Image (cartoon, grey):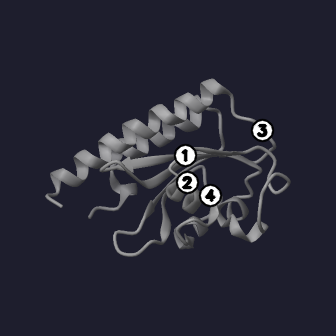
Amino acid sequence: MTEIREIPAVIEVCDGLLKEVSCEFVALAFQNEVGPDVRWHYAAGNLNDKYQRITVRFGKGIAGKIISSGSPMMLSDFPNDIYGKVTDHPIMLAEKLISCYAVPLFFNSSPKGVLLVGKRSAYTFTEEEQQMVKDSAERLEQLIRNHISGEGV
């Protein structure tokens, strides 16, 4: 399968979110095709490439929790508003994020991915911004579905 970061339309949606939501970071994570682990596959506005080496267990970290619960999650003042250990949130640490909003990406009615927007300052994302992220997630689901079916996977 082609890497997500090589699909121009996916990059376009993520770059658009950077501007629309006035956030500093946008990233996509997906559950591995084999096994339950979750990996970050694409980032825009990243400080470094550490995100590419982050793998979290199903149910752990922001990505793992969103995929296991199938529901959105917001952190407004990391690490002050978290349950568990700071090290359970490697993407927040790697990118020096203080706030984020993340939503699940669904494939075949199951949460298999995560779209995350983040800021490097304390912030609460508005209802309107949350809706923009959800709308972008739906566009990404469609783009990725079309891409996968186009490859005959």
Q: Quadrant of residue 65?
A: bottom right
Query: Residue 123 — which label?
Result: 3
Residue ID for mark 2: 66
Type of amino acid at the residue the image marks with label 2? Ile
Q: Assess whether mark 1 and mark 2 are in contact (beta carbons under 8 angstroms).
A: yes
Q: Callout 4: 10 Å neighbours few (<14), some, many (20+)?
A: many
| Residue type at numbered disc 1 | Ser
Question: Nearer the N terminus, badge 3 or badge 4?
Answer: 4
| Near-viewer residue (19 or 133) | 133
Could you tell me which secondary element the residue under label 4 belongs to? helix
The CA span between labels 2 and 4 is: 6 Å
Q: Nearer the viewer, mark 3 or mark 4?
A: 4
Callout in the foreground (3, 1): 1
Camera-side mark, 4 or 1:
1
Disc 3 and disc 2: Cα gap in Å? 20 Å
The image quadrant that residue 121 belongs to is: top right
In the rendered structure, which amino acid carries the disc numbered 3?
A: Tyr
Residue 91: image x %, image y %? 64, 62
Q: Residue furthest left?
A: 152
- Which residue in the protein does label 1 denote? 71
Q: CA distance from mark 3 to mark 4?
A: 17 Å
Query: In the rendered structure, which disc, 4 or 1, sits on the residue that comes first in sequence?
Result: 4
Identify the mark nearer the N-term, 3 or 1: 1
Disc 2 and disc 4 in contact, CB within 8 angstroms: yes
Callout 2: helix, strand or loop? helix
Residue 77 in percent (x, y) is at 81, 47
Residue at position x 73%, y 64% from top? 93
